[in-house]
Image (tube, rainbow, N blue to C red):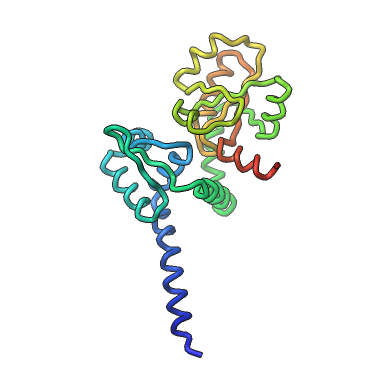
């Protein structure tokens, strides 16, 4: 039997798989994809969030575009990017989880950062959803408002981090509050909980974000 067609098939196939791998070899492109997993964003918004220049963001997005990982549309003078399809959200969530289980530095870095927030108490997604059902807690989404509008955990209230102080003025201190942001590697929720506790509220950190909530819903229905 001639193995040449088999070898050619395998080479062609894995060469295509490697196109995705090459795209993911950049820390900046991974951050851009994580941001896009939260909802559509303009090049300018992505540049602001990543502290990169618009030119650098555009260059990274072009590489992601060439591998069909993102797509774009025009809105007035702005170019708006999104992930190419919903499957990429699941892929990213699985990759974060795999990296954390295989690379000891990731939980170490994460713990080291969160330890700066004294007495930070984390509730599981199941615990928060259960408390929401019986009305014993409110859930705040402290991401930017446009990310909340794109998708959010049902029942959550949009309070971007920079608006939190004003929102807290309207709440009685007796109420329990949980906060979430972009998932396990986002810092907004921890910052929000610290501010709420400083103001005298009973506040909890929710590590999961909207993508983890969607996965939870799929697994439990």
Report the side of 148 relative to 202 (left or right): left
Q: Position of residue 200 (x, y in %)?
A: 60, 13
Q: Nearer the viewer, residue 218 or 23?
A: 218
**What x and y, as percent, mark residue 28?**
38, 46
The residue at 56%/50% (across/down) is 94
Look at the picture and state if 197 lies above or below 53. above
Does residue 105 appear in the picture of this structure? no
On screen, residue 73 above or below 76: below
Foreground: 207 or 159?
Answer: 159
Q: Is residue 8 visible?
A: yes
Residue pictured at 42% horizontal, 53% vertical: 24
| Image quadrant in which you'd find residue 178 | top right
Q: Position of residue 188 (x, y in %)?
A: 50, 29
Quadrant housing the C terminus: top right
* Residue at the farthest right position: 134
Up the image or down, 204 lies above or below 72; here it is above
Image quadrant where residue 47 sits: top left
Name the side, left or right, on which 220 lies relative to 178: right
How many callouts does the rendering have? 0
Q: Residue at x 45, y 68 (%)?
A: 14
Question: Residue at the spot x=60%, y=40% of the render?
Answer: 214
């Amino acid at each position: 039997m001639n193995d040449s067609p088999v070898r050619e098939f395998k080479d062609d196939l894995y060469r295509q798989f490697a196109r995705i791998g090459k795209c993911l070899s950049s820390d900046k492109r991974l951050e851009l994809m994580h941001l896009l997993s939260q909802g559509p964003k303009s090049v300018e918004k992505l540049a602001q969030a990543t502290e990169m220049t618009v030119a650098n963001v555009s260059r990274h997005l072009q590489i992601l575009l060439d591998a069909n990982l993102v797509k774009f549309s025009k809105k007035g003078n702005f170019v708006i990017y999104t992930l190419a399809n919903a499957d990429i959200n699941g892929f990213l969530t699985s990759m974060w989880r795999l990296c954390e289980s295989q690379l000891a530095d990731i939980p170490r870095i994460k713990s080291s950062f969160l330890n700066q927030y004294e007495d930070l108490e984390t509730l599981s997604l199941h615990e928060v959803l259960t408390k929401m059902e019986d009305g014993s807690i409110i859930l705040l989404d402290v991401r930017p408002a446009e990310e909340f509008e794109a998708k959010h955990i049902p029942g959550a209230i949009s309070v971007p981090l920079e608006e939190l102080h004003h929102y807290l003025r309207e709440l009685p201190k007796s109420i329990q509050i949980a906060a979430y942001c972009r998932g396990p590697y986002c810092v907004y929720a921890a910052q929000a909980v610290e501010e709420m506790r400083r103001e005298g509220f009973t506040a909890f950190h929710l590590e999961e974000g909207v993508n983890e909530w969607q996965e939870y819903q799929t697994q439990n229905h």
